Amino acid sequence: MATVNPKKPSKGPTTSEKSPPVQVKVNFKVPPGMALTWIDHAVTSASDTEVVVSLYQFEYPIVRPKDGDTMATVCMARLVLTPERARQMAESILSSLKGRGVGV
């Protein structure tokens, strides 16, 4: 189950009313052929209204770097989440890692 906050139809340019949240069932779909990729690095930034998560992958092939070298990365995806959804996502990730020997 998920909670959604549907917006009411606009009554004018200054209307920002929202309908009360509702509980809905979620049918998760992954499109055929959707890429699955490793992520080597993540950068997050947050404000009072959103959290942006940028996911990066090193450009391959990687030659063993020396200390202080600069390595190129490519942003593979950027996610924009509400703070509440980001908290739920973090809790879900931590819950998935418990008992798997990763020190969580």
Image: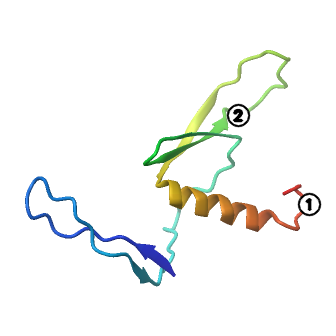
Residue depicted at x 52% and y 61%: 85
**Outermost residue, left side:** 12
Between 81 and 22, which is closer to the camera in this rendering?
22
Residue 64 occupies which quadrant of the picture? top right
Disc 2 designates what residue?
60
* Left-right relation of 21 to 80: left
Residue 21 occupies which quadrant of the picture? bottom left
Q: Earlier in the sequence, mark 2 or mark 1?
A: 2
x then y, percent, for residue 30: 52, 69
Q: CA distance from mark 2 to mark 1?
A: 28 Å
Disc 1 designates what residue?
101
* Left-right relation of 37 to 97: left
Looking at the picture, which amino acid does disc 2 mark? Tyr
Residue depicted at x 47% and y 84%: 25
Residue depicted at x 47% and y 55%: 82
**Outermost residue, top side:** 68
Specify few, some or many for label 2: CA neighbours under 10 Å numbering under 14, 14-19, or 20 or more: few
Mark 2 against mark 1, which lies toward the viewer? 1
Between 55 and 90, which is closer to the camera in this rendering?
90
x then y, percent, for residue 99: 88, 68
Between 63 and 14, which is closer to the camera in this rendering?
14
x then y, percent, for residue 19: 27, 73
**SS at mark 2 in the image:** loop
Looking at the picture, which amino acid does disc 1 mark? Gly
**SS at mark 1 in the image:** loop
Residue 91's mark?
none
